[in-house]
Image (cartoon, rainbow, N blue to C red):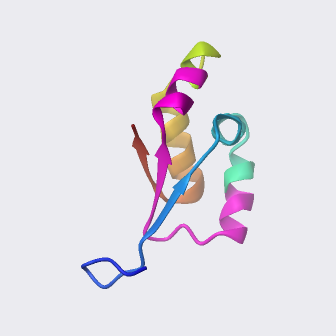
Amino acid sequence: MVGTNGRSVKDYGLDTCVGIKIYENPNVGDLLSCRINFENSTIHLCSQTVIEANRLGYDINAVSKQISESTGAKVIIG
């Protein structure tokens, strides 16, 4: 799919376990980036992911930041 700016639009959603695994071990995000080109991509963390991460004691903002740094994608919390 191509967005209005002519660039490819790529949106992804991550399961809570994947987000936490990337937070705990950034190399997992780097490895994922080797398989998936996250350039100009957005990763969405849905409300259920936020609830589960908070229930497990993780700061969703810190998790989001690490995911973004490891993959290079923009992360949206929603």
Q: Is residue 7 left or right of residue 21?
A: left
Tag count:
0
Image quarter where the C terminus lies is top left
At 58% across and 57% down in the image, what residue appears?
Answer: 71
Residue 38 is covered by the magenta coloring: yes
Give the quadrant of residue 63. top right
Image quarter where the N terminus lies is bottom left
At 48% across and 38% down in the image, what residue appears?
Answer: 46
Give the quadrant of residue 30. bottom right
- Residue at the extreme bottom: 6
Residue 56, above or below 32: above
Q: Which residues are magenta?
A: 30-52
Residue 34, above or below 19: below
Residue 19, above or below 60: below
Give the quadrant of residue 34. bottom right
- Please state the horizontal and vertical placement of residue 66, each as a whole percent of the image: 55, 42
Observer-nearest of 41 and 62: 41
Observer-nearest of 3 and 32: 3
- Please state the horizontal and vertical placement of residue 39, each as a whole percent of the image: 49, 71
Q: Is residue 49 left or right of residue 17?
A: left
Observer-nearest of 27 and 8: 8
At 73% across and 40% down in the image, what residue appears?
Answer: 25
